[in-house]
Image (tube, helix red, strand yellow):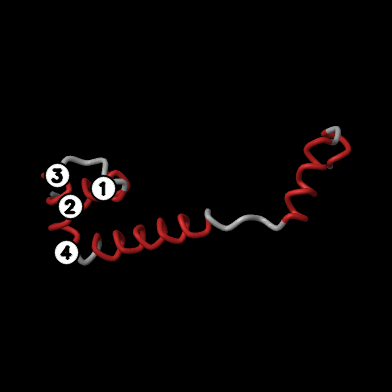
Amino acid sequence: MECEQVIQRLWAYLDRELDEATAREIEAHVRECLHCGPHAEFERRLREAIRTSAQEKAPTTLRERLARLLDQNPEEAR
């Protein structure tokens, strides 16, 4: 598998959406490729950071302020 194919399929691979044979090809390529290996690791870490931060709730005061702004007339909110 070539780098371009790996990069195009990387998110599907990380989401475990690919068939087993394709996933194994990507894993083998990523282990050996000096370009795709670091790229895949970056994407893996980015996904983890997004997943972790998505679990944090906004402070109550911020949520209340946003709710008030959304309830206002759009012209007043500016």
**Residue type, label 2:** Ile
For marks 4 and 1 on the same chain, the one whose residue lies earlier in the sequence: 1
Contact, mark 2 vs mark 1 (Cβ under 8 Å) = yes
In this picture, is 32 found above or below 64?
below
For label 1, the crowd category at 10 Å Cα-Cα, with few meaning under 14, some 14 to 19 and many 20 or more, is many
Residue at which label 4 appears: 31
Q: Residue at position x 85%, y 36% from top?
A: 72
For the residues labelled 3 and 2, the Cα–Cα distance comes to 10 Å
For marks 3 and 4 on the same chain, the one whose residue lies earlier in the sequence: 3
**Residue type, label 4:** Arg
Q: Quadrant of residue 41?
A: bottom left
Front tag of 4 and 1: 1
Contact, mark 4 vs mark 1 (Cβ under 8 Å) = no
Contact, mark 4 vs mark 2 (Cβ under 8 Å) = no
Where's residue 35, x and y in %?
A: 25, 63
Front tag of 3 and 2: 3
In this picture, is 8 found above or below 58?
above
Residue at which label 2 appears: 26
Q: Nearer the viewer, residue 23 or 36?
A: 23
Query: Which disc number belongs to residue 20?
Result: 3
**Residue type, label 1:** Tyr
What secondary structure is found at the residue carrying circle 3? helix
For label 4, the crowd category at 10 Å Cα-Cα, with few meaning under 14, some 14 to 19 and many 20 or more, is few
Query: Which disc number belongs to residue 13?
Result: 1
For label 3, the crowd category at 10 Å Cα-Cα, with few meaning under 14, some 14 to 19 and many 20 or more, is few
For marks 1 and 3 on the same chain, the one whose residue lies earlier in the sequence: 1
As drawn, is 68 to the left or to the right of 55? right
Q: Residue at position x 26%, y 47% from top?
A: 13
For marks 2 and 1 on the same chain, the one whose residue lies earlier in the sequence: 1
For label 2, the crowd category at 10 Å Cα-Cα, with few meaning under 14, some 14 to 19 and many 20 or more, is many
